Structures are given as C-alpha cells and as structure tokens.
Amino acid sequence: MSETSTPAGLLAGRYHLERELGRGGMGVVYRARDLLHEQFGEPSASVALKLLGEAFSACPDAHVLLYSEFAMTRSLRHECVVRVFSFEVDTPSRVAFFTMELMHGITLDRLLQECPGGLSWRELQPMALQLLDALAYAHQRKVLHGDVNPANVMVSEEGVRLFDFGLGHAPAQVAAGLPSLSRNRFNACTRAYAAPELLAGGELTAAADLYGVACIVYELAHGKRLGERQPTQRLARPRQLPRHCWQALCSALAVDPQRRTITVAELREAMGCTRRAWYL
C-alpha cells in the first residue's frame, strides 16, 4: 500500500487519522491512532480505518455499501483474512467507517513488480497455499470475494492476508435482510484478474473467484499477467511451476466457467501435494 500524507482529522472523537495507506475500487484506507486505547496504555493502538472514496460517499446509501463489506468480513475468522473490529459513524461529519487490523508488509502487486521473472517454487508455494486457504475458507463460509487480485493481498513476515471484500457477496447475508452490494451499479473490479463472465456482465460465483486466484498463482510463477485470450488458446507451463499441479491450474484458468471443473479447495490440494518419487 502506498503511504501518502493526508490532513489530520478525528473521527468519532477517538480515531486520529495519520496518513493514507491505499485506495481501492470503492474505498480509502488510512492508518489511524485509537486515542481511547492509547489513553489506557495499549501498546499497539494503531488501526487501519476504511471509509468510502469521494465518488461513492456521495451515494445516498453509501453507509449501506460500507456496512455490507464489514458484515461479510466480520463473519470470517481465519489467520489469512484481515480481521475487522467495529463499524462506526462520525456523527458531525456523517461519515461511516470501519476499523480493522493494521497490516504490515507490502501488497502482492508491489512484490510482483520487484520480481519480473516470477518467484521460485520454494517462495511461491507457501504464499499460494495461504492465499488459497483464505479463499477456500471464505467459500466454505458462503462468502464470495468478488475482486481477487494482487493489490488485495498483503505479504509480510507473518504470512499472507486477503482483504477488501467490498465487491463480495454472501447469500446468507441477503437472506437475513442485511444490506448487499449490487454489482450492476458499479464497475470497480480489477479487469486483469476478473473472470471473463464477470466482464460480460455475468453473476459473481465461486468459479469467478477461482479464476482470479488462479491468475495470481500463474503470475507468481510466470512473472507476467495472463492477459486476455481465446477460449481455445493453450497455455504454456511456467518453468517454476511443477508439472503435477499444472493440470489443476489450467482447469482453474479456463475461459469458459463450465470448464473450471475444480474448486478453490481442490486447487489448494493440488498445489500443496508433493509428487511421489518414482520408486514408491
């Protein structure tokens, strides 16, 4: 995430904005000090604070859009998914926001810029497995991410964190009457990692999330983005990627969603297995 200066501000009488950390398709994330926790001697009183960008904050239901993301992410408890803390509204400014853990490290898109030739299998595999673990867990909880791309993955010494569920979908949330984002209103997904059916106006599905994460794994190995291609176009296996997991990745990268015959969990299993020696 980039770190640029932002005017000092105080939200909800408690959160002092320090600087901007990054911008996504809909929101802006700031580093903030929690003055209440700081007052009580909390040694780690800094949080990340997300609010909607100017283009979206003007919408009459802007707070609903932000709460939708908060509610989905709140339901996830996994070491590789960002933890959210609370949803609040600053009454004087009528600005809605939510707080979450302050992640350290760099986003995966920046890491890829530093590795134009891709990563070795020893470096690639643990990152891919953690990312696939996070997404498989979200799918198990019936939560779709909606915008799986390297800018929404944080890499640090502690491992990988998946974040920004702002374009996601959770059927249980809709069934319970909680707010939900209509993707038809916004075109904010990252096109280079969006499944072809999403670009054509189709519905978000687990298969679409699978395509996005498979694009990331391919780029980690190849060093370059996959790019647009024809349904019949064959892919060449990146040399860093073992042969025993290539078939599964190819299935996940199928242009036709009907030909993506595996799940995120099954791709994770293929990426995690160790090919047996010939003499066993």
Image: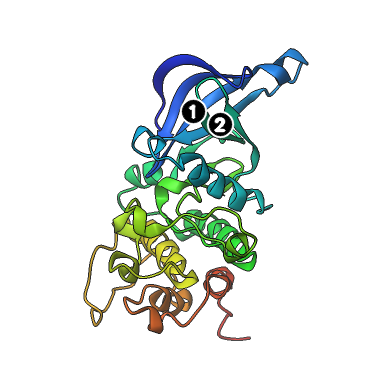
Considering only order in the chain, which callout, 1 or 2, is on the residue closer to the N terminus?
A: 1
Q: Is residue 268 visible?
A: yes
- From the viewer's side, name the closer residue of 48 and 247: 48
In the picture, measured across the screen, residue 114 lies left or right of residue 231, that is: right
- From the viewer's side, name the closer residue of 245 and 140: 140
Dot 1, how many residues are within 10 Å of its Cα: few (below 14), some (14-19), or many (20+)?
many
> What residue sits 40% from the left and 18% below the top?
5
Query: At label 2, which amino acid type do we have?
Result: Ala
Give the quarter of the image for residue 273. Answer: bottom right
Q: Is residue 204 above or below residue 246?
A: above
Q: Which mark is residue 48?
A: 2
From the top left corner, tell me how far across and down residue 280 is, in percent: 63, 86
- From the viewer's side, name the closer residue of 218 and 22: 22
From the top left corner, tell me how far across and down residue 185 is, in percent: 35, 54
- From the viewer's side, name the closer residue of 278 and 256: 256
Q: Which mark is residue 30?
A: 1
In the picture, measured across the screen, residue 55 lies left or right of residue 213, that is: left
Q: Which mark is residue 136?
A: none
**Dot 2 lies on which element?**
strand
> What residue sits 45% from the left and 47% below the top?
152
Q: Is residue 162 visible?
A: no
In the picture, measured across the screen, residue 40 lies left or right of residue 63, that is: right
Give the quarter of the image for residue 23. Answer: top left
Q: Is residue 134 above or below residue 266?
A: above
Q: Spatial distance from mark 2 to mark 1, Cα to Cα?
A: 6 Å
From the top left corner, tell me how far across and down residue 16 is, in percent: 56, 17
From the top left corner, tell me how far across and down residue 91 is, in percent: 57, 24
Q: Is residue 97 above or below residue 138?
A: above
Dot 2, how many residues are within 10 Å of its Cα: few (below 14), some (14-19), or many (20+)?
many
Total numbered labels placed on residues in the image = 2
